[in-house]
């Protein structure tokens, strides 16, 4: 075991010096006046409020189902896009359904249904008109 | 200069007035508590460090306030163990910005034919009133020692001063101090050693 060198004494003195400086600085922190403490308090609460305004990590995850639904809809649209003739058929079908609903909901059409002399001729005519307007499929 | 007028009143906890985020959310609540606890633990020492660098109480308050807000905005979701070096890094940057601005302002003012009194420099008459508290000898001794230390700290180069305060007062280790100062660990050791040498040279006679 070697005896402590001259550096050991220097280190000990440096340690003492640091301890003394630390004690003094900590004492000066304790003596910070009320005005400064009050301002720091206000600043702290403002910062905490600022942090709580930000949406949390988990809250951002709560938007995942909506994002997934939108992504799925976009994916379906992209898959259907190349088959444009199928897309046209779907659009045509939707268009006809809307037309039928329009006829059923129309007040004049309801009068025609209630007219016993008509006997549903209006609807037969409407179906014929619809079929005659349908583009030929070549069948 | 100070922007404290716009802040919430003291001693009032943040309210859940914002409809977007509810503080009743347990994660947000525990995070807010942790952040509040962290900031309460560092704010006084941070103020002391900023004051030593800026030598102006209101500037030091502004710097600490900005650092708190910046930490809350940008890093509140980081693990709490990372907050301290990040907070002091932000504070260090803020102090540097303020010192640069002050230098530029000083240059501009030096060119002016007259200097208007800055209203922020007005002294608070209550703070200036003489204290009638008798100072016991021990208290006086501490005050003298602290005065000498503060004077010696002021004489240090800024990097040495900040490294010394971060290590001695805040208790950051070498790695944390390096993160806070934005320099290498070797640089921290060098600055700290030189700071110790200078302070001992200046205070050695006074303290022994």
Image: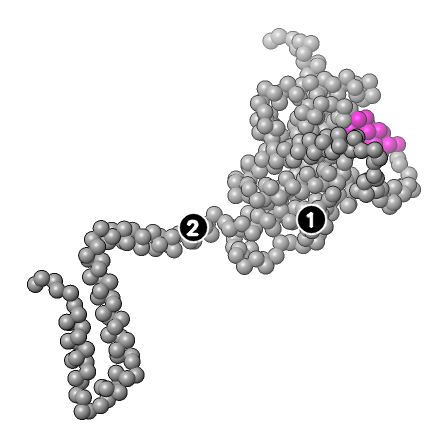
**Image: magenta residue range:** B137-151
**Mark closest to the chain's N terminus, 1 or 2:** 1
Mark 2: few/some/many CA within 10 Å (<14, 14-19, 20+): few
Splitting the image into 4 quarters, where does residue B81 fall? top right
Q: Main secondary structure of the magenta part?
A: helix
Circle 2 SS class: helix
Front residue of B201/A127: it is: A127
Estimate the x, y position of residue A117 in percent, counting from the top left. Answer: 18, 91
Quadrant where the N terminus of chain A sits is top right
Residue A127 is a magenta residue: no
Residue at x 61%, y 57% (from the top left corner): B15
The quarter of the rendered structure image containing the C terminus of chain A is bottom left
Q: How many marks?
A: 2
Residue at 66%, 33% (x, y): give it: B97
Q: Where on the picture, by quarter, is residue B128?
A: top right
Location of residue A45 in the rendering, given as x and y in whole percent from the top left corner: 65, 49
């Amino acid at each position: 075991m070697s005896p402590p060198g001259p550096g050991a004494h220097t280190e000990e003195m440096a340690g003492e010096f640091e301890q003394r400086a630390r004690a003094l600085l900590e004492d000066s922190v304790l003596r910070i006046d009320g005005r400064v403490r009050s301002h720091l308090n206000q600043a702290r609460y403002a910062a905490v409020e600022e942090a709580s305004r930000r949406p949390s990590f988990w809250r951002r995850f709560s938007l995942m189902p909506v994002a997934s639904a939108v992504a799925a809809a976009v994916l379906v649209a992209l898959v259907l896009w190349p088959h444009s003739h199928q897309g046209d058929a779907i659009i045509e079908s939707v268009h006809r359904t809307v037309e039928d609903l329009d006829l059923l909901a129309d007040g004049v059409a309801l009068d025609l249904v209630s007219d016993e002399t008509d006997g549903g001729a209006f609807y037969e005519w409407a179906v014929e008109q619809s079929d005659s307007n349908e583009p030929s499929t070549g069948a | 200069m100070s922007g404290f007028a716009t802040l919430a009143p003291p001693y009032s906890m943040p309210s859940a007035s914002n409809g977007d985020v509810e503080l009743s959310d347990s994660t947000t609540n525990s995070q807010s508590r942790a952040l509040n606890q962290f900031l309460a633990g560092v704010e006084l020492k941070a103020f002391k460090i900023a004051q030593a660098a800026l030598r102006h109480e209101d500037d030091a308050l502004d710097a600490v306030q900005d650092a708190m807000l910046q930490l809350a905005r940008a890093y509140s979701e980081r693990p709490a163990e990372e907050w301290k070096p990040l907070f002091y890094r932000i504070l260090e940057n803020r102090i540097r910005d303020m010192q640069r601005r002050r230098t530029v302002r000083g240059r501009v003012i030096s060119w002016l034919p007259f200097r208007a009194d800055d209203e922020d420099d007005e002294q608070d008459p209550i703070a200036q009133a003489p204290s009638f508290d008798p100072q016991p000898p021990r208290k006086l001794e501490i005050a003298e020692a602290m005065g000498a230390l503060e004077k010696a700290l002021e004489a240090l180069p800024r990097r040495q001063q900040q490294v010394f305060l971060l290590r001695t007062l805040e208790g950051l280790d070498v790695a944390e101090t390096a993160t806070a100062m934005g320099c290498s660990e070797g640089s921290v050791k060098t600055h700290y050693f030189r700071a110790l040498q200078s302070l001992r040279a200046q205070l050695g006679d006074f303290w022994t």
